Amino acid sequence: MSFDERVVLYNAGDADDLTVAYATTIHKAQGSEYPAVLLPIHTQHSVMLARNLLYTAVSRGRRLVVTIGSARAVKASVENSRSRRRFTRFARRLAGNG
């Protein structure tokens, strides 16, 4: 097994101590579904507390969605329906100017 850029060897008897785990971001999960979603949510990341992101995260789970963290953060997300304006050059590129 590779860990921290080093090879670590385990005996066959130690296999029970290993757990496979995966993590991804809400943005990368868009368009995907998972059997279960574990969503950490906290007020410390207030810029990310938006209804559309919460909806995207919660709607990724097919059978189970568990939120861990602050009820206040969930409430803030639900109440925040504002989308932030994005500053891109998309229109200029479409027009051939970018």
Image: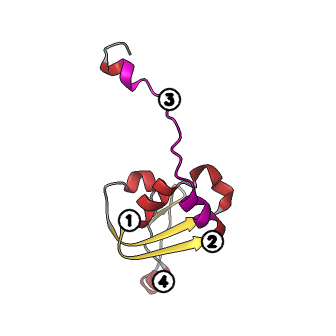
- The answer to whether the residues at label 1 and label 4 have Cβ atoms under 8 Å apart is no
Task: Please tell me how crowded label 1 is: few (under 14), some (14-19), or many (20+) other residues with Cα within 10 Å.
Answer: some
Disc nearer the start of the sequence (3/2): 2
Instruction: Pick the quarter of the image with the C terminus.
Output: top left
What amino acid does circle 4 point to? Asp
Q: Residues within 10 Å of mark 3 (few under 14, many from 20)?
A: few
Residue 33 visible at all? yes
Magenta region, residue range: 73-92
Give the image location of residue 75, x and y in percent.
60, 65
Location of mark 4 (residue):
14
Which residue is painted at 56% across and 54% down in the image? 80
Mark 2 is surrounded, within 10 Å at the Cα level, by few (under 14), some (14 to 19) or many (20 or more) other residues, namely few
- Answer with mark 1 or mark 4, whichever residue precedes in sequence: 4
Residue 87's label in the rendered image is 3
- The answer for how far apart the CA atoms under marks 3 and 1 are is 27 Å
Where does label 1 land, which residue? Answer: 59
User: Is residue 93 depicted above or below 61 in this figure?
Assistant: above
The disc, 3 or 1, on the residue closer to the chain's N-terminal end is 1
